[in-house]
Image (spheres, rainbow, N blue to C red):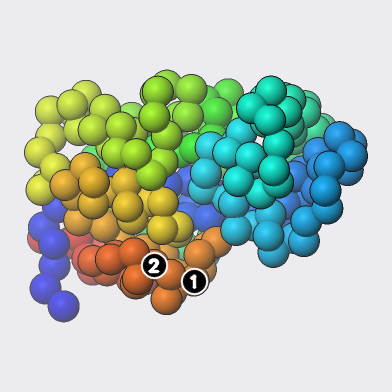
């Protein structure tokens, strides 16, 4: 496969850089239990990952808009209790690949459905802040994934054309977001959505290991 020759890489966080599925699903289940909502399986909860927090619950269980807000608030409180007791590892080869790409002159950014406070907690704990040039979190924008606003804001901030950027993520929401912004996309197959789902969404590339990103964007 011919290299893309892209210089700006817009990365998702959950399911792409960090293996947060267990933490998220556990916190969702605790939120559902605490609020005495209809039960859902772990698999059903995991399928919501990638959506904005409130929508994770409103898409999962029939509820009012007000209850959706209550779910999101409750989730955040439980999450910060859990995050100190549960390990959140990066996926294999993520850290070294990011550092190599940054050293090679690529501009790396993050576009996440996670809140800025939560996202920065992870970025700093993983010592990525020196390698990530720009971050867009859910509370930085009006329209979240799969709307292209996160990518468009990033491109405008960096003064980069869509055709010169690559969006990388583990869900169909990431792929749709990238395409709607006019960018090429790369799906990682080890995250929250399957290889087939990513292919059906139109991912331009699929990788099974984060280190394969180097061969896609290499000059």
The residue pinned by badge 2 equals: 198
Q: Is residue 30 visible from the viewing direction of this image?
A: no
Q: Nearer the viewer, residue 193 or 62?
A: 62
Residue 206's disc is none
| Callout 2 secondary element | helix
| Residue occupying image coordinates x 83% and y 53% | 39
* Placement of 138 over or under 191, stated as above or below: above
Q: Residues within 10 Å of mark 1 (few under 14, many from 20)?
A: some
Front residue of 78/4: it is: 78
Of residue 13 and residue 69, the one placed in the foreground of this image is: 69
Vertical position of residue 82 compared to residue 190: above or below? above
Q: Residue at x 13, y 62 (%)?
A: 4
Give the quarter of the figure containing the N terminus.
bottom left
Question: Quick one: label 2, few (<14), some, or many (20+) residues within 10 Å?
Answer: many
Residue placed most toward the observer, 120 or 140: 140
Image label count: 2
Looking at the rendering, which quadrant does residue 219 occupy? bottom left
- Residue linked to disc 1: 194
Q: Is residue 144 visible to the viewer in this orientation of the structure?
A: yes
For the residues labelled 1 and 2, say whether their Cβ atoms are less than 8 Å apart.
yes
Cα–Cα span, label 1 and label 2 = 6 Å
Give coordinates of residue 199: x percent, y percent: 34, 72
- Residue depicted at x 63% and y 40%: 58
For mark 1, give the secondary structure: loop
- In the rendered view, does 37 fall on the left or right side of 138? right
Q: Position of residue 119 (x, y in %)?
A: 54, 33
């Amino acid at each position: 496969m011919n290299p893309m020759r892209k210089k700006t890489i817009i990365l998702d966080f959950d399911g792409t850089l960090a293996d947060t599925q267990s933490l998220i699903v556990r916190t969702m289940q605790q939120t559902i239990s605490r609020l005495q909502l209809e039960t859902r399986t772990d698999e059903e909860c995991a399928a919501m990952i990638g959506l904005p927090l409130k929508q994770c619950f409103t898409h999962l269980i029939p509820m009012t808009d007000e209850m959706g807000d209550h779910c999101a608030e409750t989730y955040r409180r439980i999450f910060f209790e859990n995050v100190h007791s549960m390990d959140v590892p990066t996926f294999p080869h993520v850290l070294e690949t990011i550092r190599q790409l940054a050293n090679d002159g690529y501009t790396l950014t993050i576009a996440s459905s996670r809140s800025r406070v939560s996202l920065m907690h992870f970025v700093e704990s993983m010592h990525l802040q020196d390698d990530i040039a720009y971050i867009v979190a859910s509370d930085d924008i009006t329209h979240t994934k799969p709307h292209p606003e996160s990518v468009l804001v990033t491109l405008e901030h960096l003064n980069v054309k869509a055709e010169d950027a690559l969006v990388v993520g583990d869900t169909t929401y990431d792929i749709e977001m990238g395409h709607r912004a006019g960018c090429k996309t790369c799906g990682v197959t080890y995250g929250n959505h399957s290889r087939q789902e990513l292919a059906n969404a139109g991912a331009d590339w699929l990788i099974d290991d984060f280190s394969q990103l180097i061969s896609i964007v290499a000059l």
